[in-house]
Amino acid sequence: MSIPRAAYPPPFNTTRASHAVLTVKDLGASRAFYVDAMGFVVSEEDGEAIYLRGLEEACHHSLVLKRCDGPPVCERIGLRVYTEDDLERAKSHFERAGLPARFVDVPHHGRTLHVADAVGTPLELCATMTTMPRMVVQFQAFKGPCPHRIDHFQVVTPEVQRACDFYAEMGFRLSEYIAVDGTDDLVFVFLQRKGNPHDIVFAGGAGPRLHHVAFTVPDAQHIIHACDVAGSFGFGTHLEHGPARHGPGHALFAYFRDPDGHRVELFNTHYQMMDIENEPVRWNLSYMRNRPWGLPPRAKWFREASPFAGIAPTEPARPGAPFTLEKFLLEAQ
Amino acid sequence: MSIPRAAYPPPFNTTRASHAVLTVKDLGASRAFYVDAMGFVVSEEDGEAIYLRGLEEACHHSLVLKRCDGPPVCERIGLRVYTEDDLERAKSHFERAGLPARFVDVPHHGRTLHVADAVGTPLELCATMTTMPRMVVQFQAFKGPCPHRIDHFQVVTPEVQRACDFYAEMGFRLSEYIAVDGTDDLVFVFLQRKGNPHDIVFAGGAGPRLHHVAFTVPDAQHIIHACDVAGSFGFGTHLEHGPARHGPGHALFAYFRDPDGHRVELFNTHYQMMDIENEPVRWNLSYMRNRPWGLPPRAKWFREASPFAGIAPTEPARPGAPFTLEKFLLEAQ
Amino acid sequence: MSIPRAAYPPPFNTTRASHAVLTVKDLGASRAFYVDAMGFVVSEEDGEAIYLRGLEEACHHSLVLKRCDGPPVCERIGLRVYTEDDLERAKSHFERAGLPARFVDVPHHGRTLHVADAVGTPLELCATMTTMPRMVVQFQAFKGPCPHRIDHFQVVTPEVQRACDFYAEMGFRLSEYIAVDGTDDLVFVFLQRKGNPHDIVFAGGAGPRLHHVAFTVPDAQHIIHACDVAGSFGFGTHLEHGPARHGPGHALFAYFRDPDGHRVELFNTHYQMMDIENEPVRWNLSYMRNRPWGLPPRAKWFREASPFAGIAPTEPARPGAPFTLEKFLLEAQ
Amino acid sequence: MSIPRAAYPPPFNTTRASHAVLTVKDLGASRAFYVDAMGFVVSEEDGEAIYLRGLEEACHHSLVLKRCDGPPVCERIGLRVYTEDDLERAKSHFERAGLPARFVDVPHHGRTLHVADAVGTPLELCATMTTMPRMVVQFQAFKGPCPHRIDHFQVVTPEVQRACDFYAEMGFRLSEYIAVDGTDDLVFVFLQRKGNPHDIVFAGGAGPRLHHVAFTVPDAQHIIHACDVAGSFGFGTHLEHGPARHGPGHALFAYFRDPDGHRVELFNTHYQMMDIENEPVRWNLSYMRNRPWGLPPRAKWFREASPFAGIAPTEPARPGAPFTLEKFLLEAQ
């Protein structure tokens, strides 16, 4: 294992996780989940797509749902860079790394760069979006869990170390990581640009696949209310894991599966991580047997993830043996 | 099945669930759990016992922990009646039912009546206790989940119908109940005197045994904070079930096991149930497969309970087949 | 001063504060306030009236708004008794006291008794109402402060002692009271039947007039959310007092004025007060200068109240000199 | 008025508001306020100083209290820069602006630069501090409002435009501002580096003086709990303004005065402001008469502030006429 240091100054200025583009089979079902039950704000919708944002977001979208006929996938995850110049520098950076990057037009974005990262995750980078009103004090529009903003992605990959190195070269700082006890094998890496624990997380497994997109909610009680409102709208069984508290990152969380199986995490906000003296926090994998409270995730939380469009996942060299709820119950008998 | 009507006026005026008397092996371990982690107020303690109350309680205790050398048990559960005269009338009532009742001296109680109910649950009834300061706005003393007051007991018995009939004759109203689908078999009965859903619950199983004692917390967020603080004090694995929301009764809850295995429920407050036109709410047992959200309880939540002192539990004629977390996972595979 | 003891057994069994009947000039404006901003559930409405209930209430209404052309008034406040027989006994009780009582038909009520209490407050008593679904876990219908149930009324009267004595004879217990320091003059009396601090409060001043109707909200955060949502709906200036914490009763509260000037209190739930050994808590009036935190109420909170229909208020013999926000600021200069 | 654009790239990389150094007359009284009532974590203390941090902070201190014999002052406010190199570049930047800057040794800091900004605010900049354990999930240590981290300072100055221009040249972005209606006069400017609305605010008035230091709390309910716990510890009258909600910045807040009169704001977390297309939000000063809900601040909130050590405040050319609670009540009569 080597824990890379973030390039500083970075080759280009990535500012934050921006948005995810998911395909779904039935926009009406997705709307019932994301808008009615989860409380997202609709920025725009038609028969082909719904653009959603959180209550405090002034950008056009942090979640795009596109109608598809085939199996649901994640088309791309989006990152924000600060300036147009950063986009140019990003293009050069990726090309130097042998990764083809091209500018494309994306509705409601400024110029947008399409590229895949070193482990194959399809990215889109832009410096600007159409602005929308922040609804942060439009309390009459607050519903259910009141998602406030996108925070991070989790991507599954068989090459966690490679992903970690690649993002460190892009200027991402490693805030926390999980390694196999007594070894150098990275299992989870939490990488960030915006000054809290993560903009993107890579976890070991067959990939690249999108494990989840995470949105913040304001208060601890919104996590509970998310579950209650989901139940009232018939999405109670879509709660897959939680409410419980993470070890790494420390957030209170609940994971839901949307009607197409895409996974969404709601969690409350994070600690700040901005100082140069803050070293990455190591966790041993065995910690996963020893969480502060709450049951371990079910096996499917580890196993299932959204494919990226047109990308066949690669299996890891050694399959993981995560500590699942099923194992926990067997051992407890 | 017959759903009995509450005797009105009642033969004597029971006002509320009052307290539980539990034996424990190590008062220090119990104190760490109940006082440090759970936030109960100590009314009195010595080498033999700890008397605890909730933050809003003006009575001396709602939970008594007595040091014992043998296996931990529940000695008795306590009910409050309104006046001394009600105690006399209670004695007559029980004796008419063939249940021996005798007055005893109990520290910090007024005159106290010891009796067992029709299904063998050892009760103690009193009309008064030593008063203590309500700590309800002594916010400097608020800790962890901030338990505010005792609310109810759950007792396991093979004779749920009999218990239901007996308490109805004592003037308890049935607020909700669970029956086997399409049959008359009562599985859970929620009985109350104080105007919310329950003072005492009887659930089918080998008994009489004490399933749990329940205490209120003020806000939804205290249920989460209970888990967090329990985790910080090393009691994270003592969380047995929850946080989740009940069907019957509708409360948000978390169940913890204390160091001796006694089960404590924390939940937020209940709806009011005071009007004569409010009919008992029926739930079919199959509902238990269909909760609003959250995982079913583990098998041990159904199986394990505290014995009452000196009382050998009787098995039910037909064993139950509760829908456990273990079954749920098997079926989900 | 004499602190009366509650008659026990009471002459008839009053169970709780039930409902208020208010007249309003514009049902649309009232709806915007009570339904959109405050989150009440509509049980029924037409061009003449709106019947509202809280989210957990299974009765048809706890608040009735009737369209009127004249100045807005409170027609009556309602109390629940337990049985039809209690209604008959109530009639006899009032008539023995020289207070004419007559049975009337009121929509959605069982037989209803109209009477005025000893200080002229127009009451209506009933034993039953049309039942409605409890919305307590219909989380999709939760809005704004999420009022859960009616809790109490506050009535202004020049005859606080007389009111206190009269309700004690009806079986109401005095839970807390405020008296002028070093004297026997009662200024506020908190009287209850349902086992928490109050069903009806009498406060000194020109009366009888209705000072406010109070509804519970589940959590402390709902008091804040009430203010936020009121602000979003243009009712921010309708917040008259709070958020702050009461001395007597200890609840966290916010007072709003509705579009017709009727005052509504939202507060979180109360301590339980059911035991015979609980003595009334005395507060000296000077306490009002010494609240735990927060500013004193503005003069209009003390001065203004809703008239009862057709009843001219009587001034007190000695005008009060409440400690207002205005006085506080003058003294602080 | 001119609304300056943030220099990009900045002359040196300031990352965030870091800490404040206050002098106090009685460390015991300060400890009772900050540690017992406010819930700060003690990093170090002796007879001369107490070093405090919030529950999630991994740095040694965000608040330093030094014992003094004279009148209490703010010695300096601290900013973090990212690297040692940024410190060197900062020194050059200030010197080019004619502002003397010198390196000093400060306990628990890396090399520290002392300088005053263009309006005279005494600053200290450092790139590193001694690290301390984050207490973010040490829930057993959570007390009262549970302050999590420092967020921003508010400084009073007669030269708001000049301060705004100076910090924009340092790379601070203007997120929101208040200007006199129909004019170019800046009254409040909210400037930030860390991606939320503010690291430093300048407000018009006699200065430079420190108006307040602001710390985040996790949930809305902690603002209420802050008041409750302050009341229990005898600091109820130290609540100066709130709980209420800000217009600019949108946060829920409560302002307390410490035993020496230094002002502390507790508020819940902010929206994210990281994208280049986000323009500064203009508010007209008249908005201050039109807040979403809650009373205006008392005159002393506008008038009083902590002097900086050894710096005589300069009066503004034109005195302000803030809309105070006192004015509001006069107008409302």
Image (cartoon, coloured by chain):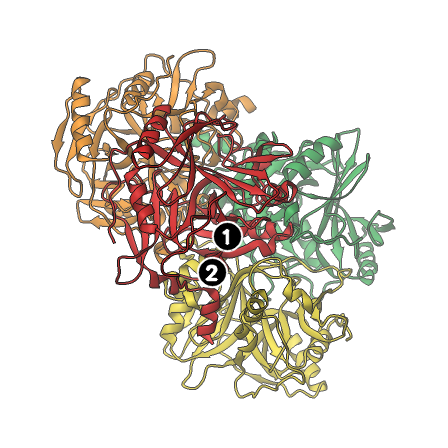
Chain colours: A yellow, B red, C orange, D green
- Image-based side of B19 in relation to D134, left or right: left
| B322 w.r.t. B249: above or below | below
Residue at left offset 51%, top offset 41%: B147
- Image-based side of A87 in relation to B293, left or right: right
Which of the pair B251/A76 is nearer the observer?
A: B251
Q: Circle 2 sits on which residue?
A: B297
Residue at left offset 63%, top offset 37%: D37
Q: What is the spatial separation of the Cα atoms under label 1 and label 2, in whole angstroms?
A: 10 Å
Q: Is residue C221 visible?
A: no
- Image-based side of A228 in relation to B90, left or right: right
Which of the pair B317/C267 is nearer the observer?
A: B317
| C267 w.r.t. C3: above or below | below
Residue at left offset 48%, top offset 75%: A262
SS of the residue under disc 1: strand
- Image-based side of A249 in relation to D102, left or right: left
- Where, by quadrant of the figure, is residue B80 drawn? top left
Question: CB atoms at circles 1 and 2 under 8 Å apart?
Answer: yes
Provide the chain ID for the residue under circle 1: B
Provide the chain ID for the residue under circle 2: B
Q: Name the residue type under label 1.
A: Tyr
Q: Position of residue C83 (x, y in %)?
A: 20, 35
Q: Position of residue D284 (x, y in %)?
A: 51, 48
Q: Position of residue A180 (x, y in %)?
A: 71, 72
Q: Circle 1 sits on which residue?
A: B255
Which of the pair D16/B108 is nearer the observer?
A: B108
**Could you tell me which quadrant the C terminus of chain A lies in?**
bottom right
Q: Which mark is residue C245?
A: none
Q: Name the residue type under label 2.
A: Pro
| D70 w.r.t. D292: above or below | above
Which of the pair A164/B94 is nearer the observer?
A: B94
Q: Residues within 10 Å of mark 2 (few under 14, many from 20)?
A: some
Q: Is residue A177 visible?
A: yes
